[in-house]
Image (spheres, rainbow, N blue to C red):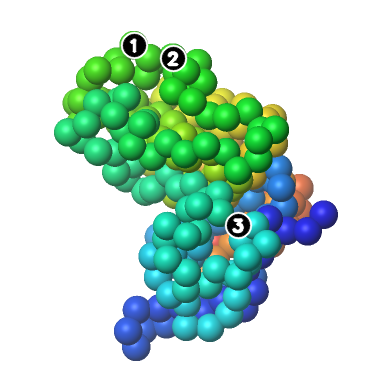
Amino acid sequence: MSALLKVDRLCAGYGASNVLFDVNLAIREGEVATLLGRNGMGKSTLVKCLCGWLKPTSGQIEFNGKAVAGAPAHVIGKLGLGLVPEGRQVFPTLTIRENLVATARPPQDAVAAAWTIDRVVAFFPRLGERMTQMAGTLSGGEQQMLAIGRALMTNPRLLILDEATEGLAPLVRMDIWRALGKLKSEKLAMLVIDKDLRALLPLADHHTGLEKGRVVMTGTSAEISAQQDRLHALIGV
């Protein structure tokens, strides 16, 4: 099976400062992959390149069969990339319903089960209880559920979650991980950035570790679990 997302020797940075150096990554349909690494190692810069917010200095990105390195964000989004951004970034002065409607688009595949407001509410019942509530008044966990629901309303082929559970209470984090497990069971491809290895290892099919903008570790959950010293150096677990 060919890769849904393929990143080949990607380099990127800001002005004269290079951040990413020859990064390679591939995700197939239905796979869950992770990006591991401490803060400042280049994970968010890679996400910006994938989403079209930052033009790479060299290298290739192919998504859904198209070369998209340097393409505008709206073009990449239409190809089926959905993002749950770091810090959630919901529209605070819009209601839950308005947040969901704002990003809605039909699925590219007519056979696929479409993500609708009713389906998002069934997935996150807590949102259904507060549909007319302003998003800015929600708890952090509810905002994260809304951010995931908003991304799902784009009917993505690949869902990227940047710091999936950062700053959330333990019980809420469990809810989010359960939700991601359900999405995996529905064969939605995902790229997850988080530091909770106990949750990531059983969820993900493979992992990529970044250090100072370079790929320093790759492998399945079993393979990276066998390298505890390297894991500790990579993310301090």
Of residue 105 and residue 130, the one placed in the foreground of this image is: 105
Tag 1 near tag 3, CB within 8 Å: no
Q: Residue at x 44, y 31 (%)?
A: 149
Of residue 31 and residue 75, the one placed in the foreground of this image is: 75
User: Residue type at mark 3?
Assistant: Leu
The residue wearing badge 3 is: 231
Q: Is residue 73 above or below residue 175?
A: below
Q: Is residue 207 above or below residue 102?
A: below
Q: Is residue 77 above or below residue 88?
A: below
The residues tagged by marks 3 and 2 sit, at their Cα atoms, a distance apart of: 36 Å
The residues tagged by marks 1 and 2 sit, at their Cα atoms, a distance apart of: 7 Å
Location of residue 173 (image quadrant): top left
Location of residue 199 (image quadrant): top right
User: Residue type at mark 1?
Assistant: Glu
The residues tagged by marks 1 and 3 sit, at their Cα atoms, a distance apart of: 41 Å
User: Residue type at mark 2?
Assistant: Pro
Whichever of labels 1 and 3 marks the residue nearer the N terminus, that label is 1
| Whether residue 174 is visible | no
Single out the residue that lies furthest toward the right: 1
Q: Secondary structure at mark 2?
A: helix
Q: Residue at x 49, y 47 (%)?
A: 82
Q: Secondary structure at mark 1?
A: loop
- Residue 129 numbered mark, or none: 1
The residue wearing badge 2 is: 125
Q: Residue at x 78, y 59 (%)?
A: 2
Whichever of labels 3 and 2 marks the residue nearer the N terminus, that label is 2
Residue 215, horizontal then vertical, whole percent: 60, 70
Of residue 7 and residue 97, the one placed in the foreground of this image is: 97
Q: Residue at x 52, y 42 (%)?
A: 196
Tag 1 near tag 2, CB within 8 Å: yes
